[in-house]
Every structure is written in structure tokens, then in C-alpha cells.
Image (cartoon, rainbow, N blue to C red):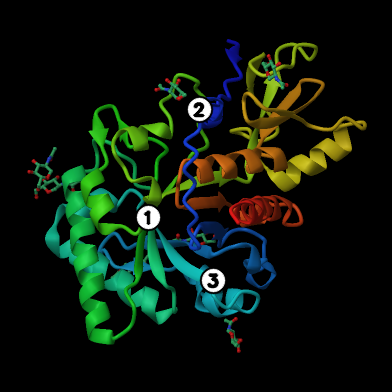
Amino acid sequence: MAYKIVTLFLLLTLSLPLNLQCTSSPNWIRGGYWHAHSELPIAEIHSALFSNLMCAFAFINSSTYNIFINSTSEQFFVNFTNTVKHRNPSVITLLSVWGGAIFSSMINQSSNRRSFIKSSIEMARFYRFHGLDLHGVLPDKCTNMTKLGTLFDEWRAEVTSESRKSGKSQLLLVMTSHHLPALESVSYPLDSMQRNLDWIHVLTFDYYLPTRDNFTEWLKRGFQAKKLVLGLPYHGYAWTLVNPDENPVGSPATGPAITIDGSVGYKFIKGFIRDYGYGAASVYNHSYVMNFFSAKTTWVNFDGVETIRSKVSFAKEKGLLGYHVFQLSNDDKWELSSAGMQLLITYQSKKF
Ligand SMILES: *[C@@H]1O[C@H](CO)[C@@H](O)[C@H](O)[C@H]1NC(C)=O
Ligand SMILES: *[C@@H]1O[C@H](CO)[C@@H](O)[C@H](O)[C@H]1NC(C)=O
Ligand SMILES: *[C@@H]1O[C@H](CO)[C@@H](O)[C@H](O)[C@H]1NC(C)=O
Ligand SMILES: *[C@@H]1O[C@H](CO)[C@@H](O)[C@H](O)[C@H]1NC(C)=O
Ligand SMILES: *[C@@H]1O[C@H](CO)[C@@H](O)[C@H](O)[C@H]1NC(C)=O
Ligand SMILES: *[C@@H]1O[C@H](CO)[C@@H](O)[C@H](O)[C@H]1NC(C)=O
Ligand SMILES: *[C@@H]1O[C@H](CO)[C@@H](O)[C@H](O)[C@H]1NC(C)=O
């Protein structure tokens, strides 16, 4: 069964009239995720290219609802903040907590939430993170969204109280969300999120269906642009074409290529193009806001330098709070990270 390569990214909205009231915030977020399972040593993170770095992941214990770090990763988390500060003393670090399967029973009871909240604050302080990021929680029927809203109210209250007691500045509270604010009539608790969270990382990638709703839904539902941080993937998707001679965007494909789900890191894609490209470069398609490359039956779409630039412009022009990238180890010699940073510098110099 052939299905279409469906890669229409939300940034089609770039072709719409842009909202040109750029807010020049000195605190524009350039966030990056470092994953404990990646091969990138923390000391090699080019932290000067980022304002914020997320260390992923801590998990929730299914019997105590306390958060914990896998013992194999602990050695990395311990020194994360100190290490990344070498190249950028003002970088802000967040401990990213994976919600996972246990999340819905955690939020179900007030005592469970209390364990989660207390342990998360303690751990963030112990490892000298500046805040916490909740990751992997979807707006779905298995998770009571009212209770998610309650969790955020309680989490914020405890963060405020802890700050008062410790005399330290409040920990940041952030969530990384699905690309849509609601799925099948289940909506995230948007009011509670706006009230309690410092910002939201929106995972504006990993979706392929052109009929899918998109990022602008957040704005349509009245979510403040200045609390939204756009996601940029450092990976693309490889597909097997039905016909190698028919390779423009939208050509029929039989399924993923190269990996099981077709996802491939940018660095790997660059290597693939070098080895199988026979001199052919990838093509940037301005209307689809993506780079793509094809060799025989393999077709790959990804965010290259041009795509990153377009998306960062989009975030600027929509008055968003910034962008975040997932994940650092897939960049190739910091090429994409530098492209985002350079675009921002161009914007700032244009303002004056
Ligand atoms: C969860 O907590 C229990 C009780 O403290 C402990 O025995 C267990 O090892 C913990 N599990 C993990 C995965 O840390
Ligand atoms: C801890 O990490 C190891 C190595 O990646 C993995 O095999 C193990 O399942 C992890 N344990 C937990 C509790 O996540
Ligand atoms: C953490 O950093 C300190 C000082 O830089 C160093 O002495 C220590 O060995 C590091 N610990 C780990 C587990 O890497
Ligand atoms: C939430 O608690 C109720 C009442 O104690 C229970 O019936 C329900 O199964 C729980 N749900 C989850 C997801 O734990
Ligand atoms: C979700 O939680 C709220 C507040 O505790 C409760 O009133 C509501 O019935 C729950 N919804 C579902 C679907 O369990
Ligand atoms: C996604 O955004 C585009 C451009 O704004 C819009 O035309 C389209 O209707 C949106 N998708 C859905 C399902 O709303
Ligand atoms: C982008 O791709 C579409 C569909 O394949 C094609 O019609 C269009 O000409 C391409 N535009 C550019 C600038 O390559």
C-alpha cells in the first residue's frame, strides 16, 4: 500500500502575511536538549550557542512517585550545570523529567503529587539546575487534564514557597508539549499552564499528515505567544520511494527507509548525502520549508541550515519566546546551532 510522503510542516504558515511586530526581547530563548543516551560528551556541548540547556531525562518512581535519575546516567547529571557553564557562565540549565506511563496515577492523588513535587524541587536544587521541564505528557483520555492543571498550581505554589524559605530565586517551571494544544477533544489545561509555567516548549515536529492541525492552534486558542518556544528537530525522515524517478515533495512512498521509523539525525543525513550523493546536494524547498535529498529510492526530508533560518524567522516574527532544538548530538559540527544563533544576531542588528 503506497502512501504519500506527507511532510507538510506547520511552517507553511510562513507564506501567510506575517505579523511583523517583532518583540525585541533580550531574553530570547535558544534552548537545546542533551540526552543522556547520546554519545555527545557534556564537555563538548557548545554552550555559548544556547541560552538554555535541558538535561534529559529523570523518571518517576512507580511506587513512591519520587523522581529519580537512572544510576547509569547519574554521573553525567551530577556535573551537567558546572560543565556547561565553562563555555557560557550565564547558561540556564533545566532538569527534564519524563512523565511516562506512571504519570496519570501520579497526578491522580494529592499525596502522589506532593511526593513528585517535593522530590523534583529537591533534586533540581541538589544538582544545581535552574529549573524543571516536564516532558512526554500528551493531551489524552488516560490523563486527567483537570488534575494536570492542579499539579501545575501545586508545583508553582511549592516552588514559590521553597524560594521564600531558601532565599534562592524561584526554579523555572517548563513543560514540553505535543504540537497541538488538544487532541480528540482533550485539551491541555491551558489556563493553568499560562498561569503557572514560565514557558512551553512546543514539539513542532515528528508529524507528517498535512491535514493535521498545527502550531498556530496555540495562538488561536489565546495562548500567549511570549510563552511559546518553537521546536526544531535535528533529525529528519527517510522514505522509500515507489519510483526513483518521481521524487518531488509529496511523491508516493512505500514506507520508512534506513531506520525502523525512518528517523535519522542531521549528522547522519549529511554523511549519507556525502556517501550516496554523487555530488548532488540537498534541495531547499521554500514553500514546504524543508530540505530534501534523494538517491535512488531513498528520499530524505530534514531541517537543514535554510530550514532552521526560516523557522527561527517565523518564531521571531510571530513574537514567540524563542526556539529549542532536539537534540544536540545530532548536529553536525554545530552547523545548525550556529545558523539559528546567526539569524538571531542579524535580527538584533536590524533593529538598531
Ligand atoms: C522506587 O522506589 C522503591 C522504594 O524506595 C525502590 O525500592 C525502587 O528501587 C525504586 N525504583 C527505581 C527504579 O528507582
Ligand atoms: C537505565 O539505563 C540503562 C542503560 O541505558 C537501561 O538499560 C535501563 O533500562 C535504565 N533503567 C531505567 C530504570 O530507566
Ligand atoms: C565533577 O566535576 C568535578 C570538578 O570539575 C570533578 O572533580 C569530578 O570528578 C566530576 N565528577 C564526575 C562524576 O564527573
Ligand atoms: C484514580 O483514582 C481513582 C479513585 O481512587 C481510581 O478509580 C482510578 O483508577 C485512578 N486512576 C488512575 C489513572 O490511577
Ligand atoms: C478529573 O478530575 C476531576 C477533579 O478531580 C474530576 O472532577 C473529574 O471527574 C475527573 N475526570 C475524569 C474523566 O476522571
Ligand atoms: C495548519 O495551518 C495552515 C496554515 O495556517 C492552515 O491552512 C491549516 O488549516 C492548518 N491545519 C489545520 C488542520 O487546521
Ligand atoms: C517545492 O515542492 C513542490 C512540490 O514538489 C514544487 O511544486 C515546488 O516547485 C517546489 N518549490 C521549490 C522552490 O523547489
The residue that label 1 is drawn on is 199
Residue at mark 3 to residue at mark 1: CA–CA distance: 17 Å
The amino acid type, in three-letter code, at marker 2 is: Pro
Mark 1 crowdedness (10 Å alpha carbons): few <14, some 14-19, many ≥20? many
The amino acid type, in three-letter code, at marker 3 is: Val
Of labels 2 and 3, earlier in sequence is 2
Question: Split into 4 quadrants, where in the image is the N terminus?
Answer: top right
Going by the picture, which residue comes out furthest to the right? 278
Of labels 1 and 2, earlier in sequence is 2
Q: Residue at x 53, y 58 (%)?
A: 31
- Ligand 5 sits in quadrant: top left
User: In front here: 301 or 322?
Assistant: 322
Residue at mark 2 to residue at mark 3: CA–CA distance: 34 Å
Secondary structure at badge 2 equals loop
Mark 2 crowdedness (10 Å alpha carbons): few <14, some 14-19, many ≥20? few
Of labels 3 and 1, earlier in sequence is 3
Mark 3 crowdedness (10 Å alpha carbons): few <14, some 14-19, many ≥20? some
**Residue 315 in the image: above or below residue 1:** below
How far from the left and from the top, in percent, is residue 22?
49, 46
For the residue with label 1, is its CB less than 8 Å from the closest atom of ligand 6? Answer: no
Secondary structure at badge 3 equals loop
The residue that label 2 is drawn on is 17
The amino acid type, in three-letter code, at marker 1 is: Trp
**Residue 152 in the image: above or below residue 275:** below
For residue 11, which numbered disc appears in the image?
A: none
